[in-house]
């Protein structure tokens, strides 16, 4: 189980928008988008090619487009490639990043403005005698030094090769795209993102579906009414529990006066004062800190899950079935869930419930 938990951590913390494996699959499709294949020609005909490497951005406003998702990844994947010059037919001299120092348009914007035929490929600008640049006008005195610098930089080009231009993957020294190296590159960038409470979500002894639900809460992506409205569905968004304000993840699970009563059970039990944080992720961290003195930290960690699961069930019962339970029932339900997840038998037996609460 240890191993499987680490896997989950890497899986979920490594990315913001997609599951990493899904993203890697898409990356692979993007990378193997080869010119000569039939499917490539079909896609190219449908969406039009942007350049030799990729189709244009898919802008159709309706429906689900697999290609829209795949195409959106290109901007992310492209910087992880270098372009290796072969016969020069695909690589654009100014626009593509083929020179070891970087993109020439960015490095020399002044010379780029001076140059004609800015869209030309390397093959179109290279002759056996060397580069064949045509400029719009004679360079001014103050431009001569820059021009010399530019010519010096591109002067080390050794000529075209027989093979086609290719993409060179930076993730390994063979230049071949591999899923695991893409994963490693993604993982490096994810380490710069804010700390994610993976331990409180995945190292918590609760059913897997509840862990997934808490992950959604931490992402503020559970289907509360505000998130439903973001998907274009119009609702009169009122909290189903207090009826006082907009139903958001942070309101429903942290700040709603109804939910606070559940939090209070456990806070008073331990006699601690706790300021309710603004967000679910902060609450998970803060709860962990608050539990430093708890008798059993594993059990302490289950408490937010039992509160949130009980609240979510009550909210859905009110939303979809029109059944309203009293706050006392929801409190009891929350405590029973906690006992159940603490490996106790599911029962209404007061003695066993007291035992569990006593052990936290
Ligand atoms: Zn409320």
Image (cartoon, rainbow, N blue to C red):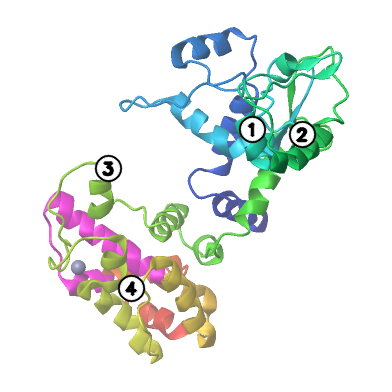
Q: Secondary structure at mark 4?
A: helix
Residue found farthest to the front: 141
* Residue 152, visible in the rendered structure: yes
Q: Which residue is mark 2?
A: 99
Asked if residue 113 is positioned above or below residue 203 in the image, the reply reads above
C-beta proximity under 8 Å, tags 2 and 4: no
Q: Which residues are magenta?
A: 304-332
Q: CA distance from mark 3 to mark 4?
A: 34 Å
**Label 4 crowding class (10 Å Cα cut-off): few <14, some 14-19, many 20+?**
many
Mark sitting on residue 335? 4
Q: Secondary structure at mark 2?
A: loop
Q: Which residue carries the number 3 mark?
A: 231
Quadrant of the rendered structure where residue 243 is?
Answer: bottom left
Quarter of the view holding residue 85? top right
Marks 3, 1: nearer the viewer: 1
**Badge 3 vs badge 1, beta-carbon distance below 8 Å:** no
Q: Nearer the viewer, residue 268 or 122?
A: 122
The image position of residue 49, as x and y in percent, is 53, 17
Query: Circles 4 and 1: CB distance less than 8 Å?
Result: no
Residue under label 1, please give it: 112
Q: What residue appears at the point 79 percent right and 40 percent down from the top-left corner?
A: 149
């Amino acid at each position: 189980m240890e191993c499987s938990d680490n896997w989950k951590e890497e899986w979920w913390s490594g990315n913001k928008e997609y599951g990493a494996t899904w993203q890697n699959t898409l990356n692979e499709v993007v990378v193997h988008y080869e010119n000569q294949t039939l499917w490539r020609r079909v896609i190219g005909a449908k969406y039009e090619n942007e350049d030799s490497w990729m189709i244009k951005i898919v802008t159709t406003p309706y429906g689900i487009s697999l290609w829209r998702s795949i195409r959106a990844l290109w901007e992310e994947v492209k910087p992880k490639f270098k372009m290796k010059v072969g016969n020069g037919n695909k690589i654009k001299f100014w626009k593509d990043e083929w020179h070891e120092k970087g993109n020439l348009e960015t490095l020399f914007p002044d010379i780029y403005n001076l140059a004609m035929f800015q869209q030309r490929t390397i093959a179109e600008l290279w002759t056996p005698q060397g580069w064949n640049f045509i400029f719009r006008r004679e360079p001014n005195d103050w431009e001569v030094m820059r021009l010399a610098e530019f010519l010096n930089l591109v002067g080390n080009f050794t000529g075209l090769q027989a093979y086609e231009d290719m993409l060179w993957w930076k993730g390994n020294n063979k230049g071949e795209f591999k899923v695991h190296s893409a994963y490693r590159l993604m993982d490096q960038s994810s380490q710069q993102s804010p700390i994610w409470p993976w331990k409180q979500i995945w190292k918590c002894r609760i059913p897997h579906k509840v862990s997934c639900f808490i992950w959604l809460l931490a992402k503020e992506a559970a289907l509360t009414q505000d998130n439903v409205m973001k998907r274009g569905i119009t609702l009169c968004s009122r909290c189903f529990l207090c009826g006082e304000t907009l139903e958001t993840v942070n309101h429903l699970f942290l700040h709603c006066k109804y939910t606070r009563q559940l939090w209070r059970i456990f806070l008073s039990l331990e006699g601690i004062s706790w300021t309710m944080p603004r967000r679910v992720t902060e609450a998970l961290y803060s709860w962990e800190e608050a539990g430093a003195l708890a008798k059993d930290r594993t059990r302490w960690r289950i408490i937010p899950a039992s509160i949130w699961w009980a609240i979510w069930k009550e909210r859905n019962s009110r939303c979809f079935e029109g059944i309203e339970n009293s706050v006392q029932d929801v409190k009891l339900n929350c405590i029973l869930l906690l006992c159940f997840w603490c490996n106790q038998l599911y029962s209404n037996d007061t003695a066993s419930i007291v035992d569990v609460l006593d052990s936290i």
